[in-house]
Image (cartoon, grey):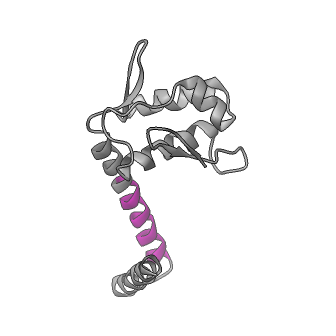
């Protein structure tokens, strides 16, 4: 885990981990924004600094930063750097909600294909939520 002066924590980024390296960086930065550890206006490390710390190429960092900017999570200022956008947290959370909805939709389809009733699926969902919340509380 690499921690930067602005509170950004990323890592480890690895070719052995699932997904391309640039996507691991994107996901890590979005996770930090969603957790309110990176506020609007916070500066991200330069391409070179992040590449050196994570042991990846400049091209990998550039691609990650470009995707973050396309997604509205960051903005760049020539000669000044890359910063967290004003509504990055809202965009990141909306994206995560969409991913959760898609996962739930897929789970419902899988349950229907397995012949489960709505009542059985709701019971399973409650059990999973209960197990997860008791794990977090411990």
| 112 vs 13, nearest the viewer | 13
Outermost residue toward the front?
A: 5
| Residue at the image point whose x is 40% and y is 29% from the top | 70
Outermost residue toward the top?
A: 79
| Residue at the image point whose x is 64% and y is 37% from the top | 54
Residue 122 position in % (x across, y down): 35, 82
Magenta stretch: includes residue 128? no
| Residue at the image point whose x is 63% and y is 24% from the top | 58
Side (left or right) of 127 relative to 58: left
| Residue at the image point whose x is 58% and y is 31% from the top | 50
The residue range painted magenta reads 98-113
Number of residue marks: 0
Residue 75 position in % (x across, y down): 36, 26
Report which quarter residue 44 is drawn in. top left
Outermost residue toward the right?
A: 16
Side (left or right) of 3 relative to 7: right
Please identify the dominant SS of the magenta region. Answer: helix
Residue 108 position in % (x across, y down): 41, 71
| 96 vs 34, nearest the viewer | 34
Q: In the rendered view, tell whether residue 80 sits above or below residue 64.
A: above
Q: In the rendered view, tell whether residue 115 sits above or below residue 32.
A: below
Residue 89 position in % (x across, y down): 31, 45
């Amino acid at each position: 885990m690499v921690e930067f002066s602005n509170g950004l924590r990323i890592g480890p980024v690895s070719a052995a981990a699932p997904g391309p390296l640039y996507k691991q960086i994107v996901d890590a930065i979005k996770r930090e924004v969603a957790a309110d550890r990176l506020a609007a206006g916070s500066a991200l490390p330069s391409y070179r600094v992040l590449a050196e710390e994570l042991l990846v190429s400049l091209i990998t960092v550039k691609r990650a930063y470009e995707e973050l900017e396309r997604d509205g999570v960051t903005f760049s200022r020539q000669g000044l750097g890359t910063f967290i956008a004003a509504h990055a947290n809202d965009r990141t959370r909306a994206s995560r909600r969409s991913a959760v909805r898609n996962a739930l939709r897929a789970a419902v389809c899988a349950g229907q294909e397995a012949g489960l009733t709505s009542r059985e699926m709701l019971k399973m969902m409650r059990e999973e939520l209960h197990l997860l919340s008791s794990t977090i509380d411990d």
